[in-house]
Image (cartoon, grey):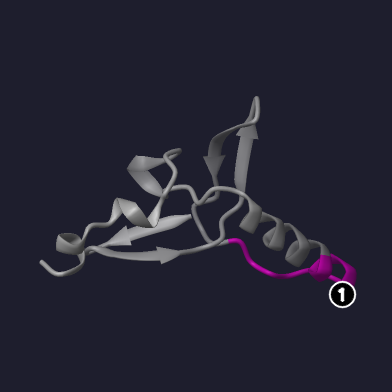
Amino acid sequence: MAHEHKGEITLIIHEVHYKDKKPDSYSENAAPVMGDAKVELAGTLSLMTECFSKPILWYGDKFPGVYSPKDITESDLNP
């Protein structure tokens, strides 16, 4: 997800929930990499890797909009 703070964009992996194949909600905090066994960690990392094939969604008021680097103009970067 794309987080915007003071004109800076940070990309953070969150858990996103879908309803009818459309983004419906997301976890407030970043998705952790944790588990009781290596196989759980591998499964989590596999899901995180899968997210790179999906659009980057905006976090916050712009959700479920899709972030695109073209959303940021030169004037946004150099006020």
- What's the magenta region? 31-42
- Image-based side of 56 in relation to 46, left or right: left
**x then y, percent, for residue 35:** 79, 68
* Image location of residue 52, percent across then percent down: 62, 58
Q: Is residue 65 left or right of residue 49?
A: left
Q: Residue at x 45, y 38 (%)?
A: 64
Above-or-below relation of 58 to 11: above
Indicate the quadrant where residue 13 lies: bottom right
Residue at 65%, 25% in the rendered image: 20
User: Image height check: is 23 above or below 44?
Assistant: above
In the picture provided, is 51 more to the left or to the right than 55? right
- Magenta stretch containing residue 21, yes or no? no
Q: In this figure, what is the number of numbered marks? A: 1
Between residue 74 and residue 27, name the one nearer to us: 74
Mark 1 burial class by Cα count in 10 Å: few <14, some 14-19, many 20+: few
Quadrant location of residue 47? Answer: bottom right
Residue drawn at (84%, 70%) of the image: 36
Q: Which residue is farthest left? A: 79
Farthest residue, direction top: 20
Instruction: Identify residue for label 1.
Output: 38
In what quadrant of the picture does the C terminus appear? bottom left
- Above or below, 62 against 2 in this view is above
Which secondary structure, mark 1?
A: helix
Reply yes or no: does residue 34 show up in magenta: yes
Residue 31 pos. (x, y %): 61, 61
Amino acid marked by disc 1: Lys
